[in-house]
Amino acid sequence: QEPHLSVFLTEGTTDQLVARIKERELDCAIGRSYEGNPQDIVQEPLYEQEPCLVVATRNQKRLSRGPLDWAKLATLDWILPPPNTPMRRLYNTIFITAGVQPPVPIMETISVRSMEMVLSSESNAIAILPRDVVNELFVGGLVAPLSHKLSWTLPPVTFLCQRHLSEQAVFRDLMQALQATARRMARMSAVHR
């Protein structure tokens, strides 16, 4: 599509990406919805993801037995997002709501590849990832989803943009292209279920 854009690919937590947008180091980003109320950033939801508990494939049957028990799960070796991120706050809330102290993680990261490596090598490692990500990793054979269905959704994946840029045609077009791609991916995902 025209005009051509220069894309800088970086990873970070939503809080880190929002800080970089506020500092005008980034014009826009794709991340989880931001809980704060930054007056200078526009958020447009793209899609939602279902959470999924994931473990090493060899531990799937053992850890899937019985009903969902957050107290039992809290005793496992958790891989969690860094503190003070929207995802970490959500996970802590889930444990607290279940009457369980949030676990102390063995690793804090947002890197899916690092999670996959630790999950596949540590016998009691567990994490929560989006189901579509787990399905992709499952093909590799190292990790597998637990059978427990979680009754909540992850914060939506969102297009974040500096407010003063959001009305420019190039950014509107980018957002619309991302929304169209997200809708197309959702339809394809529904067909493969």
Image: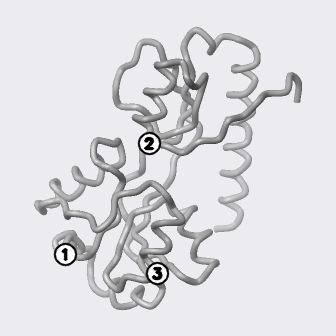
Across and down, in percent, residue 38 comes to 40, 18
Disc 2, SS: loop
**Residue 136 lies in what quarter of the image?**
bottom right
Q: In the image, 113: left or right of 177?
A: left
The percent position of residue 103, horizontal first and vertical second, equals: 20, 64
User: Callout 1: helix, strand or loop?
Assistant: loop
Give the mark nearest the N terminus, 3 or 1. 1
Q: At 88% from the left edge and 24% from the top edge, which residue is drawn?
A: 2
Sequence-wise, the earlier of marks 3 and 2 is 2
Q: Residue at x 67, y 43 (%)?
A: 182
Vertical comparison of 69 with 132: above or below: below
156 shown above or below 148: above
- Kind of residue at disc 2: Thr
Q: Amino acid at mark 3?
A: Ser
Residue drawn 45% across the image and 61% down it: 129
Q: Quadrant of residue 24?
A: top right
Q: Which of the two labelled residues, at mark 1 and mark 2, occupies the earlier sequence position? A: 2
Mark 3 vs mark 2, CA separation in Å: 24 Å
At a point 28% along the width and 68% down the height, the residue shown is 106
- Give the quadrant of the N terminus: top right
The answer to whether residue 42 is above or below residue 45 is above
Q: Which residue is mark 3?
A: 120
Snapshot quadrant of residue 102: bottom left
Whole-angstrom CA distance, mark 3 to mark 1, is 18 Å
Q: Nearer the viewer, residue 184 or 72?
A: 72
Q: Quadrant of the C terminus?
A: bottom right
Q: Is residue 74 left or right of residue 47?
A: left
The residue indicated by pointer 1 is 75
